[in-house]
Image: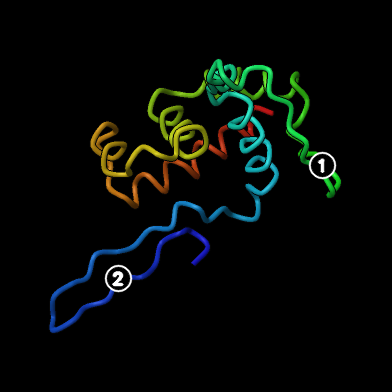
Amino acid sequence: MSSGLIPSRTVSGRPIKTAVDFSRVHARHKDIDVRLAHWAYWVTQRSSAWRVHPMFAQYRSHAWQWEAPEVHATGTPGDNQAMETLVSALPDKHRTAIRWAYAFPFVPVSVVRRHLGLTREGLSRMLDDARDMLLNRI
């Protein structure tokens, strides 16, 4: 079951749709998965700052931070830029699948499938192929 596909079953002779787990990653793709996750964090657009109501613009909180702050490593900017270059050099369908899986996971699967003209299993295979292409280009 390492391919991300869950075998289909039948109930009363009628087939049940095959479920695909897009979050499963092959063991050979673990390193590229980590790099793509850091790249996705780097490439995702965020608003510049939260707007504060003018009444609270000069407000100073008297709350103290008792726990040590957590520092999350997101990779080096050079590595993220190199990953962006590699992802943008992929063929169109593979690039769209990688960007959907990592940078834009909020887009529904059905929309991506319809846009690429693939089944769920086809989209899972496309993601695996795209990760393989990125591994080959590194």
> Within 10 angstroms of label 2, few (less than 14), some, or many (20 or more) residues?
few
Q: Percent from the top left, x then y, of residue 71?
A: 80, 39
Q: CA distance from mark 1 to mark 2?
A: 54 Å
Q: Compared with residue 9, is residue 37 higher up or lower down, i.e. above or below?
A: above
What residue is shown at x 64% (from left), y 24% (from top)? 83
Amino acid type at image mark 1: Trp
Tag 1 secondary structure? loop
Which disc, if any, is residue 64?
1
Q: Percent from the top left, x then y, of residue 32?
A: 66, 40
Q: Percent from the top left, x then y, of residue 124?
A: 41, 48
Amino acid type at image mark 2: Ser
Q: Percent from the top left, x then y, of residue 107?
A: 36, 37
* Relative to 28, 72 lies left or right: right
- Of residue 93 and residue 24, the one placed in the foreground of this image is 24
Which residue in the structure is indicated by mark 2? 8
* Relative to 71, 37 lies left or right: left
- Of residue 35 and residue 86, the one placed in the foreground of this image is 35
> Within 10 angstroms of label 1, few (less than 14), some, or many (20 or more) residues?
few
